[in-house]
């Protein structure tokens, strides 16, 4: 079991590394792209487990409504929000503004063979 979850986490990280600067995606969008549409929570666990890896832009992964639900996994009070704002993303009350315009859908943007 551990091996398969590690493999899934690696696939999540491959997708997360491709999220462009100034864009965000959701846990569910990554799960859907990986063929595991009901595994959004596992994508969240992968993002939480990545907090010591600077190569993975976990701050660009939010919930399906644009809420910064993973913010408490970042060091500092508002680090996730600060990282997003440094990329030009507007955040108010822990929610990304104009979410639909900054949303990046890997199912549309990436080939289906990652």
Image: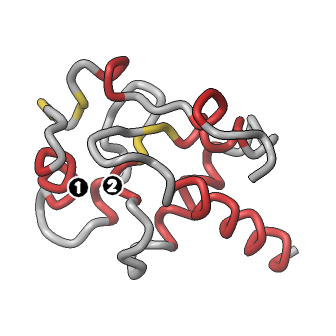
For the N terminus, the image quarter is: bottom right
Image check: 12 left or right of 22? right
- Name the residue located 40 percent from the left edge and 59 percent from the top edge: 58
Distance between mark 1 and mark 2 Cα atoms = 5 Å
**Relative height, residue 23 to residue 99 (above, below):** below
**Count of labels in the image:** 2
Q: Position of residue 45 (x, y in %)?
A: 57, 61
Among numbered discs 1 and 2, the one appearing first in the sequence? 2
Q: Tag on residue 80?
A: 1
Question: Residue 78 occupies which quadrant of the picture?
Answer: bottom left
* Residue to which mark 2 is pinned: 59
Of residues 64 and 111, the one drawn nearer to the viewer in this rendering: 111
Observer-nearest of 71 and 61:
61
Q: Position of residue 23 (x, y in %)?
A: 34, 38
Q: Is residue 43 above or below residue 53?
A: above
Is 93 on the left-hand or right-hand side of 105? Answer: left
Query: In the figure, 4 relative to 103: above or below?
Result: below
- Would you say the residues marked 1 and 2 are in contact, meaning their CB atoms lie under 8 Å apart? yes
Q: Quadrant of residue 9?
A: bottom right
Q: Secondary structure at mark 2?
A: helix
**SS assignment at label 1:** helix
Q: As drawn, is 60 to the left or to the right of 26?
A: left
């Amino acid at each position: 079991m551990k091996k398969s979850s590690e493999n899934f986490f690696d696939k999540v990280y491959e997708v997360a590394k491709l999220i462009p600067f100034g864009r965000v995606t959701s846990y569910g969008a990554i799960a859907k792209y990986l063929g595991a549409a009901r595994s959004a929570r596992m994508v969240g666990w992968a993002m939480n487990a990545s907090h010591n890896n600077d190569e993975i832009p976990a701050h660009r992964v939010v919930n399906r409504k644009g809420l910064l639900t993973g913010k408490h996994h970042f060091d500092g009070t508002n680090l996730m929000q600060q990282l997003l704002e440094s990329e030009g993303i507007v955040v108010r009350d822990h929610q990304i503004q104009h979410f639909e315009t900054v949303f990046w859908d890997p199912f549309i943007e990436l080939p289906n063979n990652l």
